[in-house]
Image: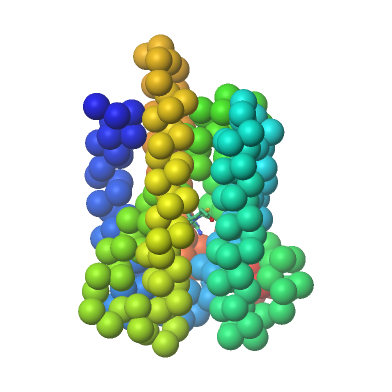
Amino acid sequence: MKFTDRLHEKTLPIWRQNHNHPFVKGIGDGTVNQDNFRFYMVQDYLYLIDYSKVFAIGAVKADDVETMGKFAGLLEGTLNTEMALHRKYAERFGISEEELENAKPSPIVLAYTHYMLHVSQKGTLAEVVAAVLPCAWSYWEIGKELNDIPGAADHPLYGDWIRMYSSEAFGELASWCIDLMNEVAEGKPEHELQKLEEIFLNTTRFEYMFWDMANNKQMWPGAETADVGI
Ligand SMILES: Cc1ncc(C[n+]2csc(CCO)c2C)c(N)n1
């Protein structure tokens, strides 16, 4: 059994909940509230800024040039392809790039990114990979599932999102993260595998909480107008 099969099995109930989440379903059938989607894209942009830094840390911790190159590819893909999607949506919503970058992160975004940055700064290369894997993997699975819904990828607003995350290029990035996880877990003692499992479980949980945050436009307690991210 591959280590990633074990991770997938362990977190299967949460993966199912992610796929069935009303926000995810709403992107697929076009019913997600536009204002919530706008909030989600702004918060996701802030998330991706820190996430990119985690990929950069991966390059620092890598032991060989090939792995460094893959992290560089993930960093490039995030900053220049994935975040270009967010910038395009922001333009449609009338949000400038400056406003986007200066928006305030929600509690979940702050907790999720800081957790990943903490794990990757203090941990091993394997721990960096365990932290980032659920993000790339689950979006690829969700993207493919939504792309299979007839007409979903042609939706005038949500189609771009579905096409990006179901694309071959994003599939390759996810597969590469899966393969690297198996490679770095190879031969590790059980107590280290359990640590990797716990990190993977935590970021999988954060993925679920991110959908919930988007669905509820969840910001800081008491933040009514000025602090809603943007
Ligand atoms: C909360 C959240 N989780 C995962 C992704 C998707 N994602 C993050 S990095 C990466 C790999 C290459 O850019 C992918 C697919 C997201 N956007 N937002």
Scheme of image coloration: rainbow
Picture coordinates of residue 217 (x, y %)?
A: 50, 68
Q: Residue at x 40, y 15 (%)?
A: 187
Residue 176 vs residue 111, the one in the foreground: 176
Against 226, residue 69 (above or below) is above
Q: Is residue 217 left or right of residue 24?
A: right
Picture coordinates of residue 202 (x, y %)?
A: 44, 38
Picture coordinates of residue 203 (x, y %)?
A: 46, 42
Q: Quadrant of the N terminus?
A: top left
Q: Residue at x 41, y 65 (%)?
A: 167
Residue 159, image quadrant? bottom left
Against 193, residue 12 (above or below) is below
Q: Residue at x 59, y 84 (%)?
A: 93
Residue 1 vs residue 40, the one in the foreground: 1
Question: How many marks are shown on the rendered structure?
Answer: 0
Against 22, residue 69 (above or below) is above
Q: Is residue 19 left or right of residue 99?
A: left
Residue 164, image quadrant? bottom left
Q: Residue at x 50, y 42 (%)?
A: 132
Q: Residue furthest front?
A: 66
- The answer to whether residue 198 is seen in the rendering is no
Picture coordinates of residue 185 (x, y %)?
A: 42, 24
Q: Quadrant of the C terminus?
A: bottom right
- The answer to whether residue 197 is seen in the rendering is yes
Residue 205 vs residue 90, the one in the foreground: 90
